[in-house]
Amino acid sequence: MAHLLNQIFDWFAAWLGGSVANDSVAGYVVAALIYLALLLNLVAVGALVFIWLERKVSGRIQDRLGPTRVGGKFGWLQTLADGIKLLTKEDLIPGDADKLLFRIAPYVGFCASLSAFIAIPFAGRDFPFVAQHLNVAVFFVLAVMGLEVFAVILAGYASASKWSLFGAMREAAQVVSYEVPMGLCVVVPVMLAGSMDLVHIGDKQQGWFTNWYLFHDPFTFIVFWVYFTCGTASVNRAPFDLAEAESELVAGFHTEYSGLRWSFFFMAEYGSMLAVSLLAAILFLGGWNGPIPVASLLGLTWHNGPLVGYLGNFLGMLNVLAKAFLLVTVMMWVRWTLPRLRIDQVMTTCLKYCTPIAAAMFVGAALWHMTLPDRVFAGLLQSPAANRLLAEPLPGDSIQLDLQTVEAATIARGGRP
Amino acid sequence: MEFTEIVQTLRDTHGEDILSVEPDVGDAWVEVPAELWPEVALSLRDDNRLGFDFLNCVSGVDYLEPDPKKVAKVDWEPHIEVVYHLSSLRLGHRLTLKIIVPRWRDDAAGQLPQVPSVAGVWSTADWHEREVYDLVGVEFTGHPDMRRILCPEDWEGHPLRKDYEMPLEYHGIRGR
Amino acid sequence: MTTAQTIEIDVRTDEMLVNMGPQHPSTHGVLRLVLRTDGEVVSEVMPHIGYLHRCAEKIGENLTARQWVPYTDRMDYLAGMNMNLGWALAVEKLMDYQVPERGRHLRVIIAELGRIASHLVGMGAYGLDLGTFSPFLYAFREREKILDLFEEVCGARLTYSYLTVGGATADFPPGWLEKCEAFLDQFVPVIDEYHALLTTNAIFIKRTAGVGLLSAEMAIDYGCTGPVLRGSGVDYDLRRDGEPIYTSMYEGYDYEVICQRAGHYPKDQEYPPVPIEAVLGDCWHRFYVRMLEVVQAIGLVRQAMAKYRASDGSFGEPMKLNQKLPKGEVYLETESPRGQMGFGLVSNGTAIPWRARARSSCFCNLSVVSELCRGCLIADVPAIVGSLDIVMGEIDR
């Protein structure tokens, strides 16, 4: 995108008699700003939609209507009205609070949640829709999302309230331990795809839904559910919402927050929910590859020209977002159905169940991958021939890692092999 | 066990100081002198024939006619009754028991009358005695934690006494 | 001989005092619990009550017996009907007055509907204490229907003052019994929903089974009553074991006292089984007793409606507002949803009682909380307090 922008700048500059180099800084900066604006909108609008959805879902689950009035039908502007209410609320900072940390905490949380989206692709193939195409995207996303715990600890510590501190300590214990099984779960698709590049992992699952890593083998099927459980826990959703446990800790770490800062915590929470769900969709649910490969069937591929390919990618983006929204809805469904676990039970679930299961499933998936050809499990559902027909060569597959070439190149640069 | 049998059992163990009153209307009750109360309580609970394992309620009743015009009409001297309602879940019988104390110890206003605590016999008495202390103003000696329970700890007076005057002000809050 | 030595290698920690309440989402009103905690572990719970003290007993000394009826339903505001009944029966005991048969059946219908409504709140709010919101609204949905029925009978939805000394203020309006019947018919299947959402929910069992163990001896010692006592396996219910003036109301009714006898609940094959983790006297059992009592109450209401229809004559005549009481003193306990609610009355022969006494069931049930919470986790404190199903209005009076 930066190059494209620089070309456009160059075209404008030529008008004025100047020129802009193809790799000029301006293009990168503007591109970054555009990406940021898009992602901010996704997270913020996503949070708006999710809060409305949460109200509607909980309302329906609880045999009531939820918001109905604001914005005409379905109360679809309810969140906006809430936002305006929050803006006009009194901004309170407790007298004993550490003022600087208290102010910073919500933004740290929001930034951590937002940064994760930098590396999450929304469509793949030849022109991936991603702000920054990283070859260690999985690693980056997990690492950055782990940063959110800092916000909670800061908020809990800075609030000068015992309830907040309890919430913060619970969050610290919980998130740190749940990163272990979550990491183990994520490693499975990484291993199957042979890459930590999310674009590559998504593209590997192209074709029918039987190609999704969810249906790769029985082990990955279980791993997905373990991942989803751990994901729910790592974003503090019920039944793992101990950090804000309303009936025990008043409101946990955000007890003392009000108004806009409080709403930033909520944006961060919903942002994280979306990020975790997007990750699940890409790793296990085929990402932008739908259950039926509509784009390939209609010929919306890059072979038939960039515009058509772009349209195919756009469909893919809708696809991945739909999957993520579905997962978020499931999280809401769980939240409004189940009671909350106790802190020791949360830790037990993590250490005694999730971690060993994830580890065993990892070994199982590895053995399966080594001994059996790909898509054997899926073959039970569908003939492999049909699959192969639709499987196109991937852009990544054409780059063969030739060890000798790499070595030669390294030596040529004066390095050691 | 019938009321008379309960009274007889108590008299056999604790002597004739235990009075019983059977009015025409309402519950019959046993009157126990305050100094006998701890041992009576123990035998009420531990005697197999009585088996009063359950203390329902402890209440205090202040007998004082605040209206000087009506004083002549009443047939009692001012006093305070601490009423215990006991029942036996095992044997299914009930007992009302009273301890009568003067309104003030040694007739000195401000000296709360004293009754031995039975919080060690029935734990129910723990909070109930605190309530009686708080509202009626009877001190239970030997109680592990004799504090006010319903009123604030710095409240003055005992509201269920008949001569209680509502304070005009409490921490800047208007009383009347 | 060498003595065994324990070397503790641990990070030194300090204890912390935390105020839970009086403004806390799960203290059921204005209960204040001071927790002494070491991290998440609670070593001591000190309850402080009295934030809702409204001097009800003092007011009772300045009003006539019937005028005090509205004050009784403001004590346990979730079971106002049962409180009215308790006071009415106590005064009737003093006056040696027996309500006519039709009035007794009317009272059973109302009291048992009140019990259902109260247990529904207890159940829903318990779910709330454990962090699940939906059962609360499911419970309130059904409770609203009972309140609608009550509203039709007396015009009020919370503070009824309907059952009063001498009977009730009015008879059922025409068509009310059919509506009540219809409600019961649609309510019975809903109970399975509650069992699915809470009673048999794995997380619910994890949170409540084996938590807040109250032995039968301790329950009796602390004067715990109602579902709290029966949840500990003590077979005692004043509807069966109470004083004649109260038990005569329930004469000829077929119902069972819910409590575990020899490891079984009455007709327990019809209900979800007791989980293996549950120990008699824990939070789960207290909850379960309430759930089963709701079923018993439905049966009682049905029987009472049949008997009410079959009987004729008066449903009782409410006592005059300023009727003089005979001189004497009485004390009567009734089985209100939360336990044994006792009303005492000392009369000097005038219309105004010399002393009106209310013995609160929750007052005693709450006094055991510091014993139950010793050594539990912070999250268990709401679970235990919630399982006692307290109403602060009744405790503080």
Image (cartoon, coloured by chain):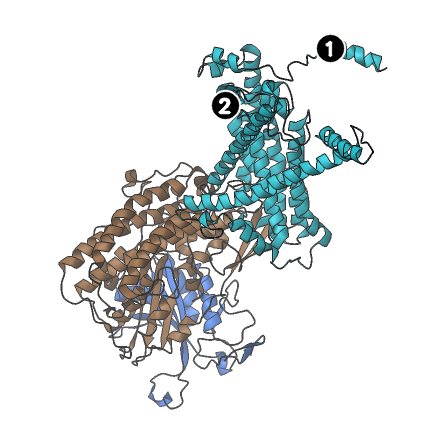
At numbered mark 2, what does the secondary structure look like: helix, strand or loop? helix
Q: Which chain carries label 2?
A: A
Compute the Cα span from label 1 to label 2: 38 Å
Q: Where is residue A228 in the image (x, y as percent from the top left)?
A: 53, 32
* Residue C346 in view here: yes
Extreme residue in the right direction: A414
Q: Which amino acid does label 2 sit on?
A: Val
Q: Position of residue C12 (x, y in %)?
A: 68, 45
Residue in the foreground of this view, choosing between A349 and A233: A233
Q: Name the residue under label 2.
A: A294
Q: Compared with residue B92, is residue A352 higher up or lower down, i.e. above or below?
A: above
Q: For this view, does B69 lie left or right of residue C112?
A: right
Residue occupying image coordinates x 68% and y 12%: A400
Q: Compared with residue B68, is residue B31 higher up or lower down, i.e. above or below?
A: above
Q: For this view, does B73 lie left or right of residue B155?
A: left
**Mark 1 or 2, nearer chain start:** 2
Label 1: how many Cα within 10 Å (few below 14, some 14–19, many 20+): few
Q: Closer to us: mark 1 or mark 2?
A: 2
Q: Where is residue C193 in the image (x, y as percent from the top left)?
A: 35, 42
Task: In the rendered structure, find residue A403 and report the number of the disc placed on it.
Answer: 1
Colour in which the image shows chain B: blue
Q: Mark 1 lies on which chain?
A: A
Q: Position of residue C155 (x, y in %)?
A: 30, 65
